[in-house]
């Protein structure tokens, strides 16, 4: 009963948030991808776009429709953990595992945003359950379910590679896992899993390995950076400190008991290997973008066996464990509540104004409604409806495109952000980049310019370069948002046939100078 009460309350809160929270910039770009359905894209595989297209096909055009399939998948993850735990524990422990999953902020709020992590984590949990069944019963249907779930993880994100590594660790490091190599079902599962790679390979082969190059080479420095040693502290914050500590203990104890067989060999090996691998990977990988959500799937097997370890300690009358588990549960519930309240404040008009006043508003949700209203008003003055809508980076372009429901093309200048986030080649494929804009030479353009999108050291050169790219700019309106952290200017220009070499206009210089006021840097979630 406690699980279903928490489940219902959390589902209602997430539903309200999904309907009222402005679209995150990555969500807006995935929505653009859903309007150009393909097997894969330059940033991620196709599943996220397919889910968004399904949501809008069923419910029409809205933020809630975009997020609806992700809400469903996110809500199913705790139920999958319950089902997994029920395989090796009694009903009470299984429901406790589900409660722990609901309480962990990363898992409890999963599905509010339409991001690839949602189908990735869902399919990861399904794959883990199928592997547990197959390892015990060796039934063909379980092996097939495993293969299909792993194929879905590949269709969700390239980070599925980490799941394969964790599964390999179980197959190599545990006696039960090593015995599975002789089972035909394992090879059937691997063949089915490999089918999920085919769309990714097809896209990369057709487009000079653009997507794989971005995910594996361009976005990562592949050199040690000491600041990544703080990863455990970051994880302790987003998981909540005591729960994070308990899960690390579960991983450690489970690894030591792996030779005892199920469930410790599978759960601890998969969970522990994933956490360790993500930590090592993070020491050399991309540290500029938001990445604390990457290890989420690694916690699910540990959450499934956590009630077993707590029960063992309670039977041994270890009072410290009972106190720690109680405090961890309270801390996790508070952590999830704080995240929900924060997102709720960002979604509510009064709350968003308060957060902006305290410079605490999530910047990638900020300003899109105001920018859309300004663009609509300025475009309404275009009597012959021939004005071209242009944004200076893919984020602003995607948000404007979503707001106009694709009714008019939105072109994007070749901003450094497009390459940084792996979207440059995709815009080129859609013919919505600066090169495609040149074909409209001579047309008047309304140019939306996010003056604070780039880092401070990059901002002035980019804004001054706008004059070279577009010629003289006449600023019509400038809006200041999020307590001054975000500034969006709207200007008109005549689209030139090619970038010129003329010096920046006085207007452009003034724009660059005003944009030097401090503003928050941008970071994406991929």
Image (cartoon, rainbow, N blue to C red):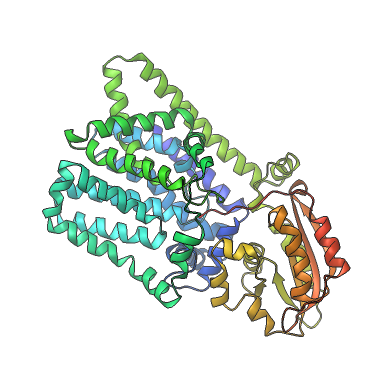
Closer to the camera in the image, 109 or 495:
495
- Residue pushed farthest right? 506
* x, y percent for residue 172: 21, 47
Q: What residue lies at 11% left-to-right and 54% top-to-bottom?
A: 182
Closer to the camera in the image, 134 or 523:
523
Quarter assignment of residue 318:
top left
> Is residue 83 found left or right of 175 in the rendered image?
right
Quarter assignment of residue 151:
bottom left
Q: What residue lies at 16% left-to-right and 57% top-to-bottom?
A: 185
* x, y percent for residue 329: 44, 28
- Label total for image: 0
Quarter assignment of residue 257:
top left
Which quadrant of the figure contains the N terminus? top left
Closer to the camera in the image, 186 or 463:
463
> Is residue 433 found left or right of 7 in the rendered image?
right
State whether residue 1 is above or below residue 58: above
State whether residue 383 is above or below residue 245: below
> Is residue 398 found left or right of 135 in the rendered image?
right
* x, y percent for residue 244: 43, 32
Closer to the camera in the image, 53 or 507:
507
Q: Is residue 455 visible?
A: yes
Q: Is residue 50 visible?
A: no
State whether residue 77 is above or below residue 507: above
- Residue pushed farthest front? 223
* x, y percent for residue 347: 64, 47
> Is residue 269 found left or right of 490 in the rendered image?
left
């Amino acid at each position: 009963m406690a699980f279903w009460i928490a489940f219902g309350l959390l589902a209602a809160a997430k539903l309200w948030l999904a309907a009222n929270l402005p679209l995150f910039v990555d969500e807006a770009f995935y929505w653009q991808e859903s309007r150009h359905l393909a097997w894969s894209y330059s940033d991620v595989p196709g599943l996220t776009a397919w889910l968004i297209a399904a949501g809008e096909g069923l419910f029409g055009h809205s933020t809630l429709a975009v997020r609806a399939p992700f809400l469903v998948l996110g809500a199913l993850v705790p139920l999958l953990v319950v089902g997994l735990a029920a395989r090796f524990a009694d009903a009470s422990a299984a429901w406790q595992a589900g409660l722990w999953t609901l309480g962990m902020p990363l898992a409890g709020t999963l599905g509010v945003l339409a991001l690839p992590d949602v189908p990735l984590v869902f399919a990861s949990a399904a794959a883990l359950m199928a592997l547990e069944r197959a390892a015990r019963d060796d039934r063909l249907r379980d092996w097939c379910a495993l293969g299909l779930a792993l194929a879905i993880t590949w269709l969700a994100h390239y980070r599925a590679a980490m799941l394969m590594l964790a599964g390999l660790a179980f197959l190599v490091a545990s006696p039960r896992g090593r015995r599975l190599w002789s089972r035909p079902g394992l090879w059937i599962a691997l063949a089915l899993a490999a089918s999920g790679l085919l769309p990714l390979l097809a896209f990369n082969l057709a487009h000079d390995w653009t997507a794989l190059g971005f995910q594996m080479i361009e976005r990562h420095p592949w050199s040690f950076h000491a600041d990544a040693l703080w990863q455990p502290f970051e994880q302790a914050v987003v998981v909540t400190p005591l729960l994070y500590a308990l899960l690390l203990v579960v991983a450690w104890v489970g690894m030591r008991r792996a030779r005892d067989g199920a469930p410790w060999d599978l759960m601890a090996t998969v969970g522990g290997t994933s956490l360790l691998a993500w930590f090592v990977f993070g020491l050399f990988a991309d540290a500029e973008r938001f990445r604390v959500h990457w290890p989420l799937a690694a916690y699910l097997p540990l959450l499934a066996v956590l009630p077993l370890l707590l029960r063992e300690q309670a039977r041994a009358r270890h009072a410290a464990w009972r106190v720690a588990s109680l405090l961890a549960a309270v801390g996790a519930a508070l952590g999830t509540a704080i995240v929900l309240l924060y997102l709720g404040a960002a979604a509510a008009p009064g709350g968003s104004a308060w957060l902006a006043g305290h410079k605490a508003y999530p910047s990638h949700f900020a300003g899109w409604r105001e920018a859309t209203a300004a663009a609509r008003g300025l475009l309404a003055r275009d009597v012959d409806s021939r004005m071209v809508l242009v944004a200076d980076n893919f984020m602003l372009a995607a948000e404007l495109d979503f707001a106009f429901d694709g009714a008019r093309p939105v072109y994007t200048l070749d901003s450094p952000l497009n390459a940084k986030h792996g979207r440059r080649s995709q815009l080129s494929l859609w013919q919505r980049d600066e090169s495609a804009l040149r074909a409209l030479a001579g047309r008047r353009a309304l140019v939306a310019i996010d003056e604070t999108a780039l880092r401070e050291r990059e901002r002035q050169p980019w804004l001054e370069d706008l004059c070279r790219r577009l010629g003289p700019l006449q600023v019509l309106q400038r809006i200041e948002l999020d307590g001054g952290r975000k500034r969006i200017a709207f200007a008109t220009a005549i689209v030139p046939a090619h970038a010129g070499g003329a010096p920046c206009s006085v207007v452009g210089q003034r724009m660059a100078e005003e944009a030097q006021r401090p503003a928050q840097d941008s970071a994406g979630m991929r």
